[in-house]
Amino acid sequence: MMSGSASQIVVFIALLIYSTGSSGSSLGDGKPKIRCKEAERQALLRIKDDLYNSTVGTFPSSWGNEEEKRECCEWSGISCDNKSGHVVKLDLSNGNAGGLFIGNMSSSLVELQYLSYLDLSGSSSVDGSFIPHFIGRLGKLRYLNLSYTSLSGEIPPQLGNLSRLQYLDLGHNYQLEIKSLESISRLSSLRLLDLSSANMSNAHDWVHVVNNLPHLTNLKLRGCGLPDTVPPSLSLVNSSTFLAVVDLSGNPLSASVFLWLFNYSRSLVDLDLSSSLSNTSIPEAFGNLAALESLNLAFNELGGPIPKSFGNMTALVNLDLSGNQLEGSIPQGFGNMTFLQYLDLGNNMLSGEIPKSIWQICSLQHFRAYNNSLSGQLQFTESATRCAHFPLEILDLEKNRIVGSLPNFTLYPLLKELWLNSNQLNGNVSKSLGQLSKLEILQIPDNSLNSEDASWVLLSQNGS
């Protein structure tokens, strides 16, 4: 789950690239109308002819050779420079153009010599499926997005000629094979790199290349089959000091990746290593990642205790440690995470009582710790003196060893899901549950609760 800051970083990169590459479209009230260059208009029409298969796909209706459509700067997905009239942006992504194109990536693109922004993501299935060599002739490109376009083959070395490129997304092209990142190593201006789902099992230089992209902020290599080639010591000369978002989930990595990532302790904001690690534990050094807002270590085979140093990560908003083999108790220091909204500790082997400090996190919206061996009573009434607002919506503690009676739940008026089944609760079903107007799911079976006088619970769920 990407944090708010992480998603803002991606948006900021895109906006920065576009603003530096274009003075904006010629459209808008009060702005002079700019006639596009005839040679570029003809090139755009050839691009359409190469991309568009009328028997399968659709294309924006604003494009055409008719007299009333001669102003190509007004075509959907096109932006021109206000001063020169040159086409600087071509966005035929599915979200923008709303079409599906099945054809060739046209060589006429090279005639748009001032193009700084090219996005064909999600809208095209390119025949031949290769990244064309002529892509390296688009020397002014700052933004290139070819994700979800059914590309295959290898990255051509000519891609390395795009020295101004800041945003490169080739993600989710499942037949793309990357044996080396040598061409990408020459993209010294790169800020975002997404190669998710490409086959990188032979790209043994990936750490070295990433480590030497001086401006890289966002790295997504999800499900790439990355080789575990992180050296024990790394030279960080010329390396990025801005790396903020890293997604290496779904790769066969080892604990050595931690040593590399800890070099970015001051800049990392969002880290996803889910489904990537086995037969290791969580290092205490994680506590040094003080800027981290989102951490996903779910569905690994992590054992041992949760480090007490986690209490030092006070900026955390999202924390997912579910689906591991973590043991011991939940650290008291979790209460220091005063911005925490999403906490998932489910499917582990945690024991002991839930720290009172958890209930004093006033920002907590989702708390899941199902299928553990947690014990003790639910004691969150003391948080009433600390929090002015209680945003908790999901509380899932099913399949634990929690004892005692049900507490007063009116502290959490926004509660939508309450899972307490398969514990050791006793006493009467709390009437406070009937006051939870937002409650949609209530699971309390497999306890020793007296529910004879709890028909009002069912009535409240039916809106009565």
Image (spheres, rainbow, N blue to C red):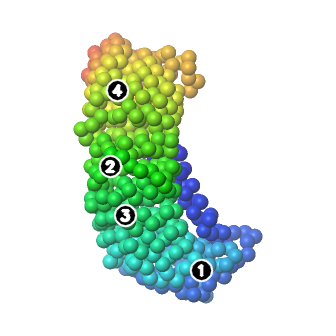
Q: Is residue 9 above or below residue 320?
A: below
- Tell me the distance, in whole angstroms, between the alpha carbons under discs 1 and 4: 59 Å
Residue 271 in percent (x, y) is at 42, 44
Q: Earlier in the sequence, mark 2 or mark 3?
A: 3
What residue is shown with label 3? 181
- Asked whether residue 456 is in view, the answer is no
Q: Earlier in the sequence, mark 3 or mark 4?
A: 3
Q: Residue furthest left?
A: 279
What residue is shown with label 1? 72
- Label 1 sits on a secondary structure element that is helix
- Tell me the distance, in whole angstroms, between the alpha carbons under discs 1 and 2: 52 Å
Left or right: 355 in relation to 97? left
Disc 3 marks which amino acid? Answer: Leu
- Label 3 sits on a secondary structure element that is loop
Instruction: Mark 3 vs mark 1: give the one in front.
Output: 3
Residue 220 in percent (x, y) is at 41, 54
Residue 392 in percent (x, y) is at 47, 30
What residue is shown with label 2? 231
Q: Earlier in the sequence, mark 1 or mark 2?
A: 1
What residue is shown with label 4? 397
Give me the residue at 40% from left, 34% from top: 285
Residue 25 in percent (x, y) is at 64, 71
Give me the residue at 50% from left, 76% from top: 138
